[in-house]
Amino acid sequence: MNFKSMLFSGIINAMIVAMIALAVNHISGREHRRKIVVTGGAILGFVIGCGFQCVAQQKNDDFDQGNTLESSQNDRKIDN
């Protein structure tokens, strides 16, 4: 797996979710919870970004190796 790509995706997603959390916090008017909401949003965004990139890379690796769902089902039909 490409860890640089995963890290980049996690950081960008963390910044996007932190900005959304900041906007929601501003709209809700609860200024005393700003640090908690932005930090929680950034952590959640980082985890989601890294997870999404990991799944996308795994799909690409499987496709490059020829391990698709259809080919595995066809192999089972031939064996039976």
Image (cartoon, helix red, strand yellow):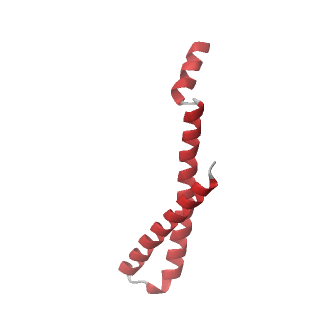
Q: Residue at x 54, y 19 (%)?
A: 74
Locate residue 29 relative to residue 74 in the image: left or right: left
The image quarter in which residue 57 lies: top right
Question: Between 24 and 12, which is closer to the camera in this rendering?
Answer: 12
Return the x and y of residue 63 as percentages of the image width and height. Answer: 55, 34
Asked whether residue 80 is in view, the answer is no
Return the x and y of residue 55 as percentages of the image width and height. Answer: 56, 47
Question: Between 22 and 1, which is closer to the camera in this rendering?
Answer: 1
Q: Residue at x 53, y 69 (%)?
A: 42
Q: Residue at x 53, y 29 (%)?
A: 69
Return the x and y of residue 52 as percentages of the image width and height. Answer: 53, 52
Q: Residue at x 54, y 74 (%)?
A: 39
Asked whether residue 30 is in view, the answer is yes
Locate residue 21 relative to residue 39 in the image: left or right: left
Return the x and y of residue 43 as percentages of the image width and height. Answer: 56, 68
Question: Between 61 and 19, which is closer to the camera in this rendering?
Answer: 61
